[in-house]
Amino acid sequence: MDEKLEPALHNIQQRNIGETEFIQAVKEVLHCMGPVLSKYPEFTEQKIIERICEPERQIIFRVPWQDDRGEVQINRGFRVQFNSVLGPYKGGLRFHPSVNLSIIKFLGFEQIFKNALTGMPIGGAKGGSDFDPKGHSDNEVMRFCQSFMMELNRHIGEYTDVPAGDIGVGKREIGYLFGQYKRIRNRYESGVLTGKGLSYGGALVRTEATGYGLVYFVREMLAARRDTLEGKTCVVSGAGNVAIYAIEKVTQLGGRVVACSDSDGVIYDDRGIDLDTLKQVKEVDRSRIHRYCELQKHARYRENGNIWQIKCDVALPCATQNELTGKDAATLVNNGCIVVAEGANMPTTPEGIEVFGESKISYAPGKAANAGGVATSALEMQQNASRDAWTFEFTEHKLAQIMKDIHDRCLETADEFGVPGNYARGANIAGFVSVAKAMESLGLI
Ligand code: GLU
């Protein structure tokens, strides 16, 4: 790290004690900022780094609700509104027992740069709760969402802050949240949430967008190496929304996904994951993936297995933060993997990133490679604002173009700053400079 940045980092660490994931995300960005501050000395004068690392607003609230037995339950709700120079705050809500302030802050921080990279007018935020929708009835999930929105509603709005889904928040949760917002505010404000159902203002392709966008990005990474997805063996960790639609697009583009996973284990199917079965297990039955092997008898399940030990050409981490360690990265490199692109947010540990950096692997960070989800959310906002609804083909074409543009921008920026082929640096620098320039123009806010 550039020594000019040491005092700022020290200060951020002192003021955010114990926020491990947040500090990890900050360090990863600051690590790339030395040459940026040399090129733009005004960023130092205006304390852009210090300002960007301090959220504009953080909201933490109690979420009381009653379970089906009538017992009172208490969860904690969060919304961290990180930066709004480029547009209204935008970013998902995560419902997962691991959620705490550090995790929401790391996600919100990453979201600033990701959203900037899309080139769309959206600021960065993230929110969520330590509530776990898994194991709760639809009615319990509804009561939780209604209570969550009881507080959240006063902080959001189509021109203020536009939440969406993330882990544990899909169409069902967004529906309950939107219903409660509409009821409290007496406003049919379609643009207040994205990832909505198609029957009430949702947009085609939003469901598929993160996974599809990731694979479009991979297509560009391979093209930059004069290669294609045709015949490539892929592994995709996770089995949620991002993983499912990444598997779908890889398959459509001629690749073969042989493995995916959940927090219990890994499934391996050498014929290529059968999507209808996977969707049935995950989207219809809301079951765990070991059930896939009951329906596809030839497939194998390994409890607590490590998916990164499976030999592949392309690895797509689509589960969660810090799921791919330095050791896993070394295994992928030794097994001849050529492309790693992140569908999840910060799935690779700092040690893993270092291993990729020293290898010949093309490595794309989540803030670039998984930006298709939020970009398509911005397309949903556009459609809501104009009371329009676009076709699947038209929207998917736009998504593919956005991913290509992000890809090219990362590479051009990496070239400009003397680190050709380094997507991680390219993404951090390009995203940061867009936000910093807007901050400069808007004055000290
Ligand atoms: N949660 C997604 C992300 O990490 C999507 C956010 C959105 O659509 O606002 O980017």
Image (cartoon, grey):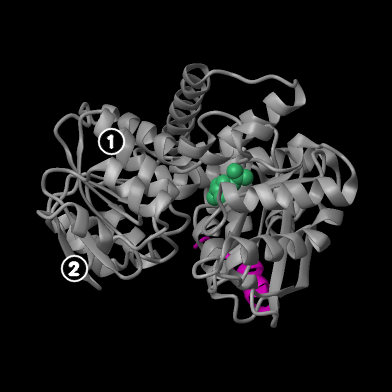
Q: Is residue 327 above or below residue 405?
A: below
Residue type indicated by callout 2:
Arg
Q: Is residue 197 visible?
A: yes
Which numbered mark, 1 or 2, is in the foreground of this view?
Answer: 2
Give coordinates of residue 174: x percent, y percent.
Answer: 64, 49
Q: Main secondary structure of the magenta part?
A: helix
* Magenta stretch in the rendered image: 1-14
Instruction: Choose between 64 and 109: the one closer to the eye.
Output: 64
- Residue 387 x %, y %: 74, 21
Side of 347 relative to 3 (left or right): left
Q: Which residue is label 2 attached to?
A: 302
Question: Image quarter for residue 87?
Answer: top right
Task: Tell me if residue 52 comes above or below residue 64 in the rendering.
Answer: above
Q: Residue furthest right?
A: 186
Q: Are marks 1 and 2 in contact (CB under 8 Å)?
A: no
Is 103 in front, or is 444? 103
Quick check: 334 above or below 379?
A: below
Observer-nearest of 148 and 12:
148
Determine the residue positioned at 36% across, 38% down. Answer: 420
Q: Secondary structure at mark 1?
A: helix
Residue 367 at x, y = what percent?
A: 50, 47
Q: Residues within 10 Å of mark 2 (few under 14, many from 20)?
A: some
* Amino acid carrying mark 1 in the image: Val
Q: What residue is drawn where x is 87% and y is 55%? A: 154
Label 1 neighbourhood size at 10 Å, few (<14), some (14-19), many (20+)? many
State the residue in front, 106 or 255. 255
Left or right of 277: which side holds 190?
A: right
Q: Quadrant of residue 206?
A: top right
Name the residue that disc number 1 marks: 250
